[in-house]
């Protein structure tokens, strides 16, 4: 949906963008598994995604 945000996920250790498990979990669930603050991640992702518009 917003491929320009992929580096954000990769930089925090979420290398599972194409992983089958990632299709069955929310961003919040993935953050819990990876020990990432979901609010901070979504702020970064939204900021980057909005740059493209």
Image (cartoon, rainbow, N blue to C red):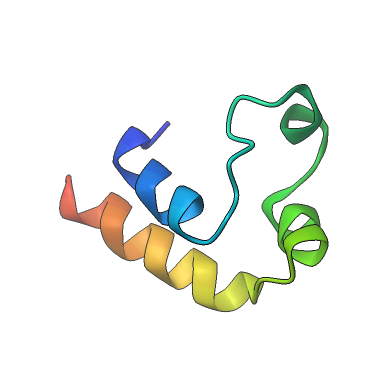
Q: Nearer the viewer, residue 27 or 19?
A: 19
Q: Tell me the residue at 25%/55% (across/down).
A: 50
Q: Where 49 sits versus 20, above or below?
A: below
Q: Where 26 sits versus 3, above or below?
A: below
Q: Nearer the viewer, residue 33 or 29?
A: 33
Q: Where 47 sits versus 21, above or below?
A: below
Q: Tell me the residue at 76%/22% (across/down).
A: 20
**Residue 32 screen position, x and y as percent:** 80, 65
Q: Nearer the viewer, residue 1 or 15?
A: 15
Q: Judge left or right: residue 8 versus residue 30.
A: left
Q: Where 34 sits versus 16, above or below?
A: below
**Residue 1 screen position, x and y as percent:** 42, 31
Give the number of marks: 0
Q: Tell me the residue at 71%/62% (across/down).
A: 31
Q: Tell me the residue at 41%/55% (across/down).
A: 8
Based on the displayed image, in which of its 4 quarters is residue 11 positioned?
Answer: bottom left
**Residue 3 screen position, x and y as percent:** 35, 34
**Residue 12 screen position, x and y as percent:** 52, 61
Q: Judge left or right: residue 41 versus residue 19.
A: left
């Amino acid at each position: 949906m917003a491929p320009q945000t992929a580096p954000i996920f990769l930089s925090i250790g979420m290398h599972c963008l194409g992983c089958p498990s990632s299709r069955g979990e929310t961003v919040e669930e993935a953050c819990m598994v990876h020990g990432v603050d979901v609010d901070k991640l979504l702020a970064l992702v939204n900021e980057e995604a909005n740059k493209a518009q």
